[in-house]
Image (cartoon, helix red, strand yellow):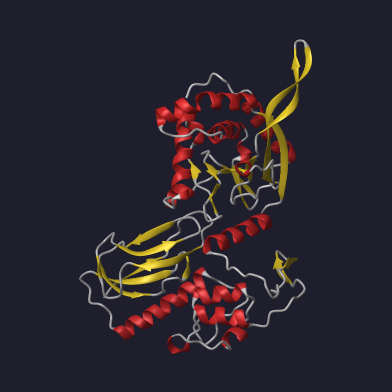
Amino acid sequence: MANFEILMPKLGESIIEATITKWLKNAGDSVAEDDPIVEIATDKVDSEIPSPVEGKLIKTLFNEGDVVPVGTVIAIVALDGEEPLEPAIAENIIEKVILEKSLEVAPIEEISFKSEKFFSPLVKSIAKQENISLHELETIKGTGKDDRVTKEDILHYTKNKSSVVSKPVQTTQTIENKIVVKPEAPKVKSDAGDTIIEMDRMRRMIADHMVMSKQVSPHVTSFIDVDVTNIVNWRNKIKDSFQQRENQKITFTPIFFEAAGKALKEYPQVNASVDGYNMILRRNINIGMATALPTGNLIVPVIKNVDEKNLLGITKSVNDLANRARANKLNPDDIQGGTFTITNFGSFDSLTGTPVINQPQVAILAVGAIRKQPAVLETAMGDVIAIRHIMILSLAYDHRIVDGALGGMFLKRMKELLENFDPNTII
């Protein structure tokens, strides 16, 4: 008798878990190869998992709404033509699989796995986040099968623990014989009249990713102002005819992407990642486009090989990805492989800002609002003051491999490319 394990796949860079939103097949159902068996969701995209084999679904190991680490077995299929396992035997195998995967995928330093009780990977993950020790975890009354502690049990327990304001706790971790102090956030007490809103899945993932980025990379931000008058006048001149011809809008974003593609080719160390003491200079220039969603969350679809596209191709890619992102129709591949990111603070009329690096990249460029300002121009007749369209670029970079000189040169090159934009450009 042979059985096949269906695993939670990895759907993108930095994605370590996904939520099971809906089972499309139930235990006992026959499944054909490539039949969708479950719908899952991450902070990036929603997707379906197809069955790689033909057979019968013996067991689903998680419920709808459960958050599951990537690489974890979520279901078992008896291969077609094979005699299915007896229920008791199948249950023992399932127990073994879950335990093995919990040890392999979700190791938790604070909790030993020598307990006689079984705790699911999700429960152990929550226990780690809430700083619940093994001894404390074993005292929680479980309502699941065989008195197991469920997700609801541990969440109920943590919610009803005494909530007091405490000083930040510091834990120590030994790394290469050095003691590293890790500060932990203090417990926060809510007052009467406060409104408590639980973060949704995407916001929790964004929060974790931002904290991780700040812990991993020493951030430095440099700024430069840019005269984009030529670009503004050019866009005003062609935007109506372009929309009539292509049935699409043209924004400033494709021009920023085109300039960034050229600058990254000249400064490859900005188009890179860090692996220990190794610098990985990326061959491809794949620029992520930070996109605000109607929910207030953020997603970063990626335009691949920007340096190989002309302005029209970049414009169509920008519009396509932005529209599909807001409609929640991105594919997993649309958010993978980014080597550099651009975010637009100007969309909300902000002059500038200090963005957080999108790991594992080493730099992110922010573009601010374009404002009319008086500027000094040098002419053959002497200096004059004129009204120009000015914007601020800010570059946040990982100081491990991008020093201030390199960051400054990259920004200066961006300024040159944008200020020397040809107002006679044909698109």
Residue found at the far top of this picture? 381
Q: State which quadrant residue 167 falls in.
A: bottom right
Residue found at the far front of this picture? 193
Q: State which quadrant residue 91 falls in.
A: bottom left
Q: Residue at x 64, y 76 (%)?
A: 131
**53 and 149: which one is in front?**
149
Residue 392 coordinates in the image, percent (x, y) = 69, 36
Residue 121 coordinates in the image, percent (x, y) = 50, 74
243 displayed left or right of 49: right
366 displayed left or right of 74: right
33 displayed left or right of 293: left
Residue 315 coordinates in the image, percent (x, y) = 48, 34
**30 and 252: which one is in front?**
252
Number of residue marks: 0
Q: Quadrant of the N terminus?
A: bottom left
Q: Can residue 269 be seen from the camera position used here?
A: yes
Q: Can residue 113 be seen from the camera position used here?
A: no
Residue 206 coordinates in the image, percent (x, y) = 58, 58
Q: Is the residue 365 above or below the residue 132 in the image?
A: above
Q: Is the residue 176 above or below the residue 162 in the image?
A: above
Q: Is the residue 189 above or below the residue 399 in the image?
A: below
Q: Is the residue 402 above or below the residue 72 in the image?
A: above
**380 and 224: which one is in front?**
380
Q: Residue at x 48, y 85 (%)?
A: 148
Residue found at the far right of this picture? 382
**388 and 290: which one is in front?**
388
